[in-house]
Every structure is written in C-alpha cells, then in structure tokens.
Amino acid sequence: MKTRVFRIEEVVWEEPPEHYDAFSKLLVNPATVGSKHFDFRISSYQPRGYCACHTHKVQEQIYYVLQGKGLMELDGEKCVVDPHTVIHIPPGVEHAISNTGLEDLVFFVITSPPEDK
C-alpha cells in the first residue's frame, strides 16, 4: 500500500448496485489505494434518489451529511437527516437512505472493514 494524494475531481461518479439516482465517488478503498481496513466515499443522491433497504454482516458504517435533507431508515424507524447529522450503523442493522428534499443530498460514508465477509 502506497501513500496517495489526489483531488476529488480525479475520481468519477459511479452508481452502485441497488442505488437509484444515487452516485458515489469511491475515494479510499482496496481498489483505489489498497486500503485494508476501511472504505471512504462521498455520495450524492439527487432528489428522489435512494438506496434500497439492506444490512451488512460484519461492516460498520458512519454517515456524515454535508448538504441537503433526506430520510434515514434504521431497523424500520425513520428520521430526517440534514447537514452535520452523524449516523452510526452497526453490523446487522437494516438501513436505507433517501433524498426527500429539494436539492442533492451529499454525505460521506466510512465503512469498516471494506468487504462484508
């Protein structure tokens, strides 16, 4: 694994599986820099964009909202999220996030470990 410095504009937006009108830039992970312990990305969901409800077996996640408003669902309970909201998702918690606002919902996602094995 090498040290790497780069700008966010160098990374292309991708639409991950089970994400709809929801895009991510995979900034630090095993494929981009050889990270063994975490995945770090920025996501941007257009109005009405969402990720389907899902769980992770072993992965733990942290979301940090930068811009916009949306709805976070955790084990069937929904709450509004907006800038500076921090969401911690332990393994095994069913979750989804959707943009219910009028502008793009932009947030960081940190996942550890990077693979859900």
Image (cartoon, grey):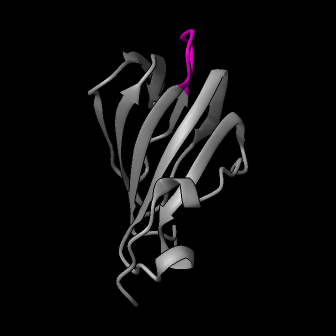
Q: Say if the magenta span includes residue 100.
A: yes
Above or below, 79 relative to 44: above
Total numbered circles: 0
> In the picture provided, is 104 more to the left or to the right than 21?
left
Quadrant where the N terminus is found in the figure: bottom left
Q: Position of residue 74 (x, y in %)?
A: 43, 30
Above or below, 90 relative to 67: below
Residue beneath the point at 48% across and 60% down: 57
Q: Say if the magenta span includes residue 103.
A: yes
Front-most of 95 and 14? 14
Q: Where is residue 107 in the image (x, y as percent from the top left)?
A: 43, 37
Over which residues does the magenta segment extend?
Answer: 98-104
Above or below, 6 relative to 68: below
Q: Could you tell me what secondary structure mostly forms the magenta stretch?
A: loop
> In the picture provided, is 13 more to the left or to the right than 82?
right
> In the picture provided, is 19 more to the left or to the right than 24?
right
Q: Furthest residue to the bottom?
A: 1
Q: In which quarter of the image is residue 66?
A: top left
Q: Quadrant of residue 98?
A: top right
Front-most of 16 and 18? 16
Front-most of 35 and 79? 35
Q: Where is residue 13 in the image (x, y as percent from the top left)?
A: 65, 50
Q: Where is residue 14 in the image (x, y as percent from the top left)?
A: 69, 52
Above or below, 81 relative to 10: above
